[in-house]
Amino acid sequence: MANSDDGDFRDAMADVVPLRRSPRANIRSGAAAARDASLAQRRAAAEQGPARDRNTLSEEGIAPLDAWYVLEFKRPGVQNGVFRKLRQGRYDSEASLDMHRMSAATARRELFAFVGESHRLGLRTVMVIHGKGQGGAERERCSLLKGCTDQWLRELDVVQAFHSAQPRHGGTGAVYVLLRKSEEKKRENRERINKGRVPYDPV
């Protein structure tokens, strides 16, 4: 009986053709390729080492300064009248950076970025607040930040002059900073001056 059933089954299935199987997508190999590419990128980054720090400001060897010490600096070429107005607080500060409670490492990064961005935006007078401190650890930190501010501003070429602020602006806990004109501002000034000129036509 079993043989008869087997024969009937084979007769019934004689004209059946197996379905064609579609090729399977090799998802595993795609993921593996992505992992390999990612691994290669990480290896290349590791070989290149850490990203180059554009910050040129000193990191060590900076002495703290007394809370009441007056900061002042002027590059050759800065007019005495301009420096006097800066010292007297007669230029409005267009931006300010408050470094209170910052570590020296954070202040170094923030000051470098602040001065660079202010110059790119064409600002001329800005203020940096380093603080004076009321006592203890706070006073020590502010004294260090003050010494750092004095050192760092001198190291930045775009800084033309600086002076401790007037009492109404924070006194010796803050400093006015005069920045060099950006190339864009110089161009704008030249265009404004030339716009009003009438060409000279000798007859």
Image: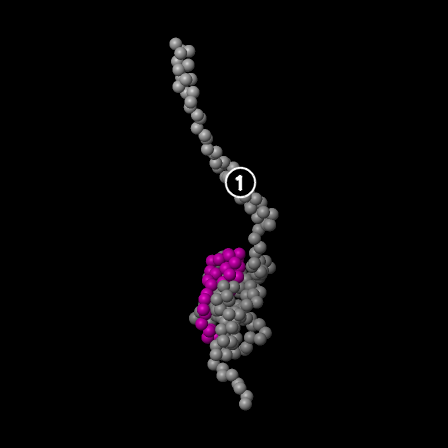
Q: Is residue 169 left or right of residue 35?
A: left
Find the residue positioned furthest to the front: 15
Question: Furthest-bottom residue in view?
Answer: 203
On the image, numbered disc 1 is attached to which residue? 33
Q: Is residue 5 magenta?
A: no
Foreground pick, 30 / 11: 11
Q: Which residues are magenta?
A: 88-115
Please state the horizontal and vertical placement of residue 28, each as a whole percent of the image: 50, 36
Residue 27: % across, % down: 48, 37
Which residue is painted at 54% across and 78% down in the image? 80
Q: Residue at x 59, y 74 (%)?
A: 76
Q: Is residue 114 magenta?
A: yes
Where residue 42 sits in the image (x, y, percent)?
55, 45
Number of disc labels: 1
Name the colour scheme. one colour
Question: Which corner quadrant holds the C terminus?
Answer: bottom right
Res. 148 image quadrant: bottom right
Q: Residue at x 58, y 55 (%)?
A: 52
Residue drawn at the location 42% of the way across and 17% of the way down: 10
| Residue 140 seen in this snapshot | no
Q: In what element is the residue under mark 1?
A: helix
Q: Position of residue 82 (x, y in %)?
A: 51, 76
The answer to which of 55 and 40 lies nearer the viewer is 40
Specify the quadrant that holds the N terminus.
Answer: top left
Kind of residue at badge 1: Ala
Closer-to-camera residue (152/49): 49
Look at the picture and state if 84 lies above or below 140: below
